Amino acid sequence: MKANRTATLIKLLVLLCLSVLCVSQDFDFFYFVHQWPGSYCDTKQSCCYPTTGKPAADFGIHGLWPNYQDGNYPQNCDSQNPFNPDKVADLRSSMQKNWPTLACPSGNGVSFWTHEWEKHGTCSESVLDQHGYFQAALSLQRQANLLQALASAGINPDGGSYSMSNIKSAIQEAIGFTPWIECNTDASGNSQLYQIYLCVDTTGKNLIECPVFPKGKCGSEIEFPSF
Ligand code: 5GP
Ligand code: 5GP
């Protein structure tokens, strides 16, 4: 009788451990990355507007990327779970508006979203399924109006040059968290504001301070090109 009860207890314990393993996420936080279309387009490679029309002059989502505390990141985690547009049909118009593709040749967004889901999204599928992943990014974007944050500090996409520290503190003040800024160079080699990184906890719902920043460097003064 006693041996029986012990065996049941052990089985329960094993089940408990397995269930914890199954739901535990295998990354530490997300980078939530926005791109400035003016800086994507204003390069030697240039860009193509989506088949659905020229995007708004606003930051667009690039991706929501699972990351490790040590700066490394997982990628392409589940080839059995390909992107399926039907799973995000209700989000599609919002994705077209807020997550537009600028790569050439012109596309409707599906290949960009496919790439982002398959490379990054599959690595957080223990917490967010396809619909949850895209929905999480869209609702995070509503919490973080970067263009407005910058405008309230007089920083506008007018081709002017702005100090990195003013850019960072404008976002810190408006959004509450320190961003990471990635630059690229325009056709004449000027350093310009290309992507803005914020960090998000493993639920995909809350912005947090970044546990680690990506590598790379901008100048102390960078251009904010128009679009
Ligand atoms: P690049 O080498 O142009 O900075 O980045 C190329 C791609 O690698 C990015 O678009 C993204 O998919 C991935 N990547 C680059 N840096 C990071 C990072 O720090 N974390 C994650 N999760 N992905 C990154
Ligand atoms: P990542 O840099 O995220 O690994 O890769 C981005 C991939 O998505 C590239 O293959 C790129 O051609 C494609 N892509 C499509 N549209 C866009 C866009 O608007 N921005 C960026 N950065 N990549 C895009």
Image (cartoon, helix red, strand yellow):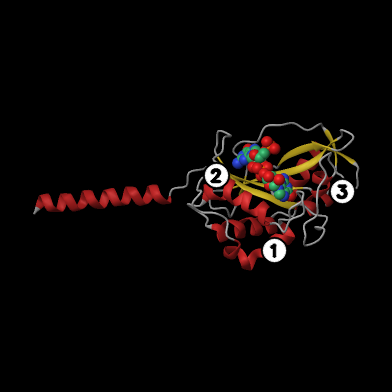
Q: Is residue 208 left or right of residue 217?
A: left
- Can you say which quadrant of the picture contains the N terminus? bottom left
The residue at the far bottom in this view is: 90
Q: Residue at x 91, y 47 (%)?
A: 158
* Residue 190 visible within the image: yes
Report if the beta carbon of the residue with label 1 is closer than 8 angstroms to ligand 2.
no
Up the image or down, 122 lies above or below 54; here it is: above
Instruction: Tell me the distance, in whole angstroms, between the alpha carbons under discs 1 and 2.
Output: 25 Å
In primary-sequence order, the first of circles 3 and 1 is: 1
Q: Residue at x 80, y 51 (%)?
A: 48
Image coordinates for residue 223, horizontal then vertical, percent: 86, 39
Up the image or down, 215 lies above or below 21; here it is: above
Type of amino acid at the residue the image marks with label 3: Pro
* Residue 34 visible within the image: no
Image coordinates for residue 226, horizontal then vertical, percent: 88, 48
Q: Are marks 1 and 2 in contact (CB under 8 Å)?
A: no
Q: Nearer the viewer, mark 3 or mark 1?
A: 1
Q: Residue at x 17, y 50 (%)?
A: 7
Q: Residues within 10 Å of mark 1 (few under 14, many from 20)?
A: some
- The residue singled out by tag 1 in the image is 94
Type of amino acid at the residue the image marks with label 2: Asn
- The residue singled out by tag 3 in the image is 157
Q: Residues within 10 Å of mark 3 (few under 14, many from 20)?
A: many
Report if the beta carbon of the residue with label 3 is closer than 8 angstroms to ligand 2.
no
Residue 156 — which label?
none
The residue at the far left in this view is: 1
Image coordinates for residue 39, horizontal then vertical, percent: 82, 44
Q: Residue at x 57, y 53 (%)?
A: 204
Q: In what element is the residue under mark 3?
A: loop
- The residue singled out by tag 2 in the image is 76
